Amino acid sequence: MSDYRAMWAELGLNLEAHDGLLAVLGKAYGDLFLSQPNRPDAMKYFDFVMSEVHGLRIKELLDAKAQGRKIIGSYCAFVPEELILAVDGISVGLCTGADFATDLVDQVLPRNTCSLIKSAFGFKLGKVCPYVEACDLVVGENTCDGKKKAYEILRQFIPHLYVIDLPQVKSEAGKALIRAEYKRFAAKLEELSGRKLEPAKLQAAIATVNAKRTALKRLAAIRRADPAPISGLDSLLISQISFYDDPVRFIGALNQLCDELERRVAKAEGVFPARRPRVVVSGCPMAVPNWKLPAIVESSGAVIVGEEGCVGERSTRWLTAETGQSVDEMIALIADRYLQIDCAVFTPNPSRLDYVRQITRGRNADGVIHYTLQFCQPYQMEAGPVVQQLEGESIPTLRIDTDYSQEDTGQIRTRVEAFVEQLRA
Ligand code: BJ8
C-alpha cells in the first residue's frame, strides 16, 4: 500500500490506533483468505480491493469529493443506493463488523447492545474509519429498537446524521410511509448535492444497482454446484465489498469471476472436494470484517453455499422494476422493492422463513446454521420459529448466538464440528 498517512491524518484518524487496526486486519486477511487453497484467479481483484480498502478507495472518494460529488454512508440494506447514484453521489456501507474502542463505547451505550451497533460507535469514537470521516451525510434508519435509539446518541458524534423512518408492518400504511420517506430522502440528497433528480439519471441509477444485484444473484446461483467452485468466505467477502466498491467496476469484476466459476463448474472443479457437507447461514448481517463464523465452519469440514442475511441474499433477491417514467413513479417503485426486504424487524415476517427453506433446498444444502448476535432481539426471536420449521421438515439446524469477541471461538468450533459430523452421517 502506498503511503496514505497524510490523507488519514487530514481525515482526523488516530494514526496509532489505525495502524493497529490495519495490522490486525491484514494478518486476519492473510490467514483466512489468502491461505485458502485453489482460489479462483479472479479473486485477485477482490484481494486488491481489500488491500487498498483504507488507501486507494479512500483516495478515490476524496478525489470525487474534490469534484463536488457527495459521499453518503449507511448502516442498513434499506438505504436506497439508487437515489444516491442519481445525484452523482457515492454510497458506502460503513464498517460494523469488529469491536473497537470498547471502553469509549461502554461509556455511551448500554452493555447489552448488539455488537453491530457497538461497532458503528467504536469505529467513530476510536477514529479509525476513513469512510465515516469522509462522509458528507451518514444515514441511519428506524429499524430495530437498538439502532433507532442508538442514532439519537450517535448524532452527538456525527452531526450530519440523517435518519429515515421505516414501517414495521407491510401494510398499505407501511407502503405509504416508506414511499414518503424515500421522497423526503430524495429531497435531502438534492439539497445536499445541489443536483436535481432527473428521470434519465434515476433510470440509469436503477439499472446500475439492478445490474449489481443481478451479478450477485448470478454468483449465488453458481454456488449450487457440487463441488463448490468458490468458498463461502470468499462469497461473503464479495458481498461485503459490494457495499463500498465503485458499482460499475465491481459488476465487471464479479461477472468476470462468475465466468471463471462457470468454467470450473463445467469441469467439476471445486475449492473443496465434492460431497463436503453443505451449509446455509441465516440470520444477522455479517458486516466487514466479521469473518468469525464462516472461518470456523469452513475449517471444520463444511462449505457455506448461501447466506440468508443482509450481507448476502436478503439485499439482492429483489430488483427494482425498470418501468417508471417520472421521478415520482420511480421513487415509488424503488420503495416497493425495498419494502420486500424481509428483515426481522417486520411483523409478521413469513417470507424470510420461506426463503431460508427455498435457498436450503435450491443449493442442495444439508443443514442451516442460524446465526444471531447477542442482544439482537428481532433475529433471536425469529430463531425459534425458523429452527422449529426447518427441523419439522427434517433439515438439521444449529443455533449460534455470539458477538465479535474471540472468546467463544473454541466453544463455537466444538459445536460446529459436531454439527458437521451430524451432516456427514
Ligand atoms: S435490513 S437486518 S441491515 S436492520 S443485529 S442492529 S437488527 S439488534 S442489522 Fe439490519 Fe437493516 Fe434489518 Fe438488514 Fe438491530 Fe439485530 Fe443489532 Fe441489527
Image: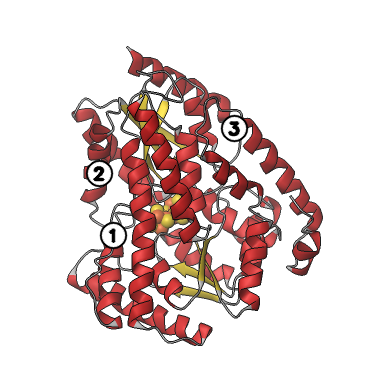
Q: Amino acid at mark 2?
A: Tyr
CA separation, marks 2 and 1? 16 Å
Q: Amino acid at mark 3?
A: Leu
Which is more N-terminal, label 2 or label 3?
3
- Res. 33 in view: yes
Rendered position, 304 above or below 207 = above
Between 235 and 154, the residue placed more toward the observer is: 235
Name the secondary structure under disc 1. loop
CA neighbours of label 1 inside 10 A, class few (<14), some (14 to 19), many (20+): some
Q: Where in the figure is residue 287, as x and y percent of width and height?
A: 51, 49
Badge 2 is on which residue? Answer: 355
CA neighbours of label 3 inside 10 A, class few (<14), some (14 to 19), many (20+): some
Badge 1 is on which residue? Answer: 319
In percent of the image, x 54 and y 43: which residue is there? 290
Q: Where in the figure is residue 159, as x and y percent of width and height?
A: 60, 77
Disc 2 or disc 1, which is closer to the eye?
1
Q: Where in the figure is residue 415, as x and y percent of width and height?
A: 45, 23
Quarter of the image where ligand 1 sits: bottom left
CA neighbours of label 2 inside 10 A, class few (<14), some (14 to 19), many (20+): some
Image quadrant assignment for residue 128? bottom right
- Res. 397 in view: no
Name the secondary structure under disc 2. helix
Q: Disc number at residue 32?
A: 3
Q: Where in the figure is residue 395, as x and y percent of width and height?
A: 25, 27
